[in-house]
Image (spheres, rainbow, N blue to C red):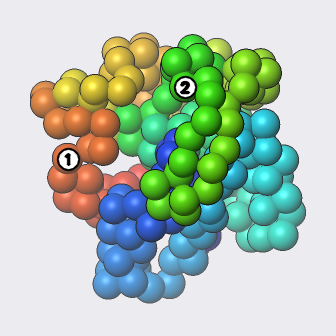
Amino acid sequence: MHVLYLHGFLSSPQSVKAQQTKAWCVGHRPEIQLHIPQLSNFPAQVGPQLEAYLAENPALTEQGIRAIGSSMGGFLSTWLVERFGGKAVLINPAVKPYELLVNYIGEHINPYTQELFSIVPEDMEVLRAMDTPAIKSPKQYKVLLQTGDETLDYRQAEGKYSGGDVTIEEGGNHSFVNFDAHLPRIFQFLD
């Protein structure tokens, strides 16, 4: 099985959750081919970048996509599942990043890559065009939410993915406390 892990905004394949996922696969499911691409910091480039990545790695879409997405990666995973079919596990997913990132217009430095980049107003329209306000089949999604998420309102995801496999934990934060404890069930869902 090929699985695509998509990190969030201002993150990278070196993030704690990405590395925990990688270590779990190595230790428990070495047959899984885990793909963790470095996503562009520029929202307008992420869609074309993912399309090119999937074209270069056709095994990722042969049986429908299998994705794990954190925050913005959850938004992108939904975009891919709605296009290619498959399943996704979303961790504190961004539901409307075009509303959230309005507060981030300006220059930023990715703390992992040290890349300097700018968020511009036009990025909001690019993200809005990628949105899937109504998902086709909620059963294709497993969603992990924590009520203490300081970045996103978990209730947005609870509403959007209603009918899917939604777990809501009290407390926690945007990084999702104790994520690694969920990895066995995450891969069980993706199988």
Q: Is residue 108 left or right of residue 136?
A: left
* Label of residue 186 in the image: none
Circle 1: is it few (<14), some (14-19), or many (20+) Cα within 10 Å? some
Badge 2 amino acid: Tyr
Residue 170 placed where, x, y %?
Answer: 13, 28
Secondary structure beneath label 1: loop
- Which residue is located at x 85 percent, y 58 percent? 52
Residue beneath label 1, please?
A: 177
- Which residue is located at x 39 percent, y 83 percent? 26
The answer to whether one can see residue 92 in this image is yes
The answer to whether one can see residue 83 in this image is no
Secondary structure beneath label 2: helix
Residue 117 placed where, x, y %?
Answer: 66, 44
Q: Is residue 78 left or right of residue 128?
A: left
Residue 67 placed where, x, y %?
Answer: 56, 53
Q: Residue furthest left?
A: 171
- Which residue is located at x 13 percent, y 30 percent? 171
Residue 76 placed where, x, y %?
Answer: 63, 40
Badge 1 amino acid: Val
Of tags 1 and 2, the one toward the viewer is 2
Q: Is residue 188 above or below residue 174?
A: below
Q: Is residue 117 left or right of residue 139?
A: right
Which quarter of the rendered picture does the N terminus lie within?
bottom right
How far is disc 1 from disc 2 in space, using C-alphas? Answer: 24 Å
Residue beneath label 2, please?
A: 104
Q: Is residue 81 above or below residue 161?
A: below
N-terminal label among 1 and 2: 2
Pick whichever, 105 or 165, lies toward us: 105
Pick whichever, 142 or 150, lies toward us: 150
